[in-house]
Amino acid sequence: MNDPDTLPENIVLIGFMGCGKSTVGRELQHRLGYELVDMDHEIEQRAGKPITAIFEDVGEPAFREMETAVLKDLARETQRQRIISTGGGVVGREENRALLRRMGYVVWLAAPVEVILDRTAKSRTRPLLHTEDPATKIQHLMVEREPLYQETAHFKLDTAGLDSKELATGILECARYFFSHCDR
């Protein structure tokens, strides 16, 4: 790479809700000047309604179909040097996991249940947490998704106790190494 501040490919952020994908994505966008693609926002734009309404109107399976369609469109595009922030459940489909790995450097942002619960406690935009026991729901989903995040990610980063600037620095250092030394 000629310019030390640029990377040749996309950086893809995966992880459970509340792990900081959107916040870290904005910090990476600020540092690199890359386009930030928030998949949840893209789905909302296409559907013309918020994710909570999508879940209420057509259910989670239909939402997951929309998510895969957006991911396929992003994978077909030739534009590179983007930050792609995914939804927490995107790894649920094998097809999606393969697409994510082909799209660039995949970083799994992780955090313990307590941190996620604290970060999402006041949010009304998390339809999967509209339950009487969100902590149990989070724990169940994390156990289900953890092996899928592991399979998909090139790098795992625990976000608890770190701010977005520290996380972005770690991601950029590892991404530069990955793109300059590793075969994908």
Image: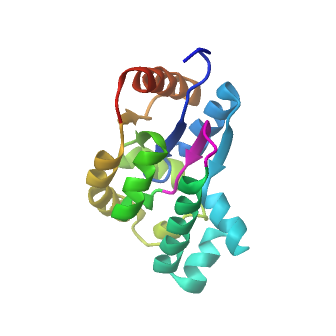
Q: Is residue 52 above or below residue 100?
A: below
Q: Residue 100: x, y in percent?
A: 44, 50
Q: Specify whether residue 31 is in view.
A: yes
Question: As rendered, which of 103 and 166 lies closer to the eye?
Answer: 103
Where is residue 14 drawn, in percent x and y?
45, 47
* Above-or-below relation of 49 to 87: below
Instruction: Please state if 23 lies on the left or on the right of 138 as rendered.
Output: right
Up/down of 44 relative to 53, above or below: above
Q: Quadrant of residue 106?
A: top left
Q: Can see residue 15?
A: no
Q: Is residue 178 magenta?
A: no
Quadrant in which residue 177 is drawn: top left
Task: Give coordinates of residue 139: x percent, y percent.
Answer: 32, 58
20 left or right of 35?
Answer: left
Residue at image x 40%, y 26%?
Answer: 178
Main SS category, magenta section: loop
Which residue range is magenta in the image? 78-87
Rendered image coloring scheme: rainbow
Q: Is residue 167 above or below residue 23?
A: above
Which residue sits at x=53%, y=59%?
A: 71
Between residue 29 and residue 18, name the one nearer to us.
Answer: 29
The residue nearer to you, when weighing 84 against 160, is 84
Instruction: Please state, as top left, top right, bottom left or bottom right, where the C terminus lies in the image.
Output: top left
